[in-house]
Amino acid sequence: MSTLQYMKPVEPILTVELFPRLSGELLSSLERLSPADWEKPTACQEWSVKDVVAHLLGGNIGRLSFGRDKLPHPNTNPPTTFTELVNLIDQENAEWVKVARRISPNLLVEFLELTDRQVYQYFKTRSPDEPASISVAWAGDQESPNWFDIAREYTEKWLHQQHIREAVGEPLLTARHWLFPVLDTFMRALPFTYRTMAMPDGPHIAFHITGEAGGDWSLLRQNGVWVLFWETASKAVASVWLDQDLAWRLFTKGVSPETAQQKVRIEGDKVLGSGILHMVSIMA
């Protein structure tokens, strides 16, 4: 029996209906914050809780202005390389957060609630399989379907909410219905991460994320490229196990590859297995 008979091709991740609930969780959390909580530092470099909320608002405004309303982007010199794109995103994020420091927490919450609703309504109008206006560059895409772009946005909103929750001591949203879509989206970066690791067709690498929100994925070498599948088969050339909490932090640069390596179990080809330690499923 072939390896393919044990594995299932990955399918679209439909996250649109998660947005209202995720927004509700964040807004409820923000309403409980004290003035001191808003100034607490987060894992996002030099950003406070208030800065991260402003960043989320800026993301909504960008989606609605440039996506829904077709506003031409003011940058007349679009980036031509991945590095230039990351630098542009970093610059625009920093500029927006600096300006938004003049907005009060109360107004930030009001604006976030308003724009969250509108982003959800906008995403509902997007046909899942049609090309998105923004590709998922961290997965190596030159063009992405809407479902992938929207799932990427879900991971962005989920991730920054966890940064806020950690900063103020609130429980993280790690139940399966929240976290599995995040991990499944992040794992779509595996073929791009392994693109330089050439092998003959046939072998596969098995990845196991443990925990309530975990799952199993495989990279199979087909026609000279790596193809991602759900589930795993026996006789993998390398097998990797990592905990769900470590996984989302590793893929978003919250844990270094060196630190993660001490907590990840790899059997078989260590070089192939350790490729996932360098996977990044965010842009900046």
Image (cartoon, rainbow, N blue to C red):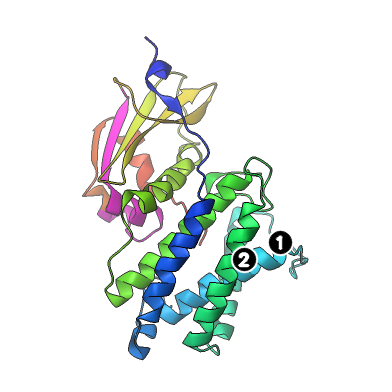
Circles 1 and 2: CB distance less than 8 Å? Answer: yes
Vertical side of 282 occupied by 108: above or below = below
Q: On the image, numbered disc 2 is attached to which residue? A: 118
Residue 269, can we see it? no
Q: Is residue 248 magenta?
A: yes
Residue 94 x, y percent position in the rendering:
55, 76
The amino acid pointed to by label 1 is Arg
Q: On the image, numbered disc 1 is attached to which residue? A: 68
Q: Which residues are magenta?
A: 236-259
Q: In the visual, does 269 lie left or right of 219? A: left
Q: In the visual, does 87 lie left or right of 174? A: right
- The image quarter containing residue 86 is bottom right
Q: Please tell me whether mark 1 or mark 2 is closer to you in this view.
A: 2
Q: Identify which residue, 77 or 149, lies in the foreground.
A: 149
- The image quarter containing residue 82 is bottom right
> Could you tell me which residue is drawn at 68 percent across and 59 percent down?
79
Q: Quadrant of the N terminus?
A: top left
> Could you tell me which residue is drawn at 53 percent across and 45 percent down?
139
The amino acid pointed to by label 2 is Gln
Residue 121 x, y percent position in the rendering:
62, 60
- Asked which secondary structure carries label 2, the reply is helix
Residue 131, can we see it? yes
Q: Identify which residue, 222 or 84, lies in the foreground.
A: 222
**Badge 2: few (under 14), some or many (20 or more) residues near its Cα, within 10 Å?**
some
**Badge 1: few (under 14), some or many (20 or more) residues near its Cα, within 10 Å?**
some
- Distance from disc 1 to disc 2, alpha carbons, whole Å, reads 10 Å
- Numbered label attached to residue 82: none
